[in-house]
Image: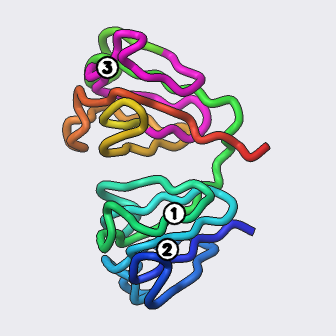
Amino acid sequence: MSKIIVFSKEAFEGRTAEFKNNVRNLEEKGFNDVICSIKVIGAPWVAYYDKNFAGKHLVFEEGEYSTLDDKGKFSSLKMVTDDLDNPEIQLFEHINYQGRKVTLRREANLHDIDFSDIASSHKVKGGVWVLYQHVNRQGSQLVSFPGDEVPNYVPLGFNDVVSHVRPLLPKP
């Protein structure tokens, strides 16, 4: 069974809680803006800065995270339950799916295909994708789910900054 275990202090110390379902508002669970370390078992989870799965966010795949760079900032948690097979994303140069387009089915450093710091919109045809501000999975993240169509990165503060993308992969 997939779950996330959160801790109020680094190194898996302090108060702890275990969640097996999405949490729209961590304040109701007494864990708003206090999570400092995480253990993920099974499916990946997305931790959001704001309640109701909104705002800046980070994906956490199976593993242990004893110190979080964004500690004390999360207000909601969402388990990734989507089909991760057959990933496909279309990135567009301009807002509203205009301009040059690139279709990806696997992880890519966008510098390698001359599409870095250009994308302004996207459509997810399959899988769950993580878009990164910098190469090598660095910087801010934008997680997008199957069927998501994001016509404009400007309101997200993500316009013309995507340099790396990858699909979350299914467990073997």
Residue at the image position 34 percent from the left and 15 percent from the top: 115
Q: Quadrant of the C terminus?
A: top right
Q: Is residue 162 above or below residue 157?
A: above
Picture quarter containing residue 40?
A: bottom right
Residue sitting nearer the eye, 9 or 78: 9
Image depth: mark 2 or mark 3 in front: 3
Residue found at the far front of this picture: 11
| Label 3 with label 1: CB-CB less than 8 Å | no
Q: Residue at x 46, y 40 (%)?
A: 130
Which residue range is magenta in the image? 103-130
The CA span between labels 2 and 1 is 6 Å
Q: Which residue is mark 2?
A: 23
Q: From what the image shows, is residue 11 above or below residue 132?
A: below
Does residue 31 appear left or right of residue 153 in this picture? right
N-terminal label among 2 and 3: 2
Residue 49, position as x, y percentages in the image: 31, 64
SS type, badge 2: loop
Residue 37 forms part of the magenta stretch: no
Q: Is the residue under label 1 in contact with that under label 2 (CB below 8 Å)?
A: yes
Q: Quadrant of residue 161?
A: top left
Q: Secondary structure at mark 1?
A: strand
- Quarter of the N terminus within the rendering: bottom right
Q: Is residue 171 left or right of residue 137?
A: right
Task: Give the residue type that dot 1 points to.
Answer: Lys
Query: Does 152 sit left or right of 107 as displayed?
Result: left
Q: Mark 3: few, some, or many residues within 10 Å (few <14, many ≥20)?
A: some
Amino acid carrying mark 3 in the image: Ser
Task: Choose the circle earlier in sequence order: 3 or 1.
Answer: 1
Give the labeled residue for mark 3: 116
- In the drawing, does residue 130 fall left or right of residue 84? left
In the drawing, what numbered circle is on residue 78? 1
Q: Give the percent coordinates (x, y) of residue 70.
A: 31, 63
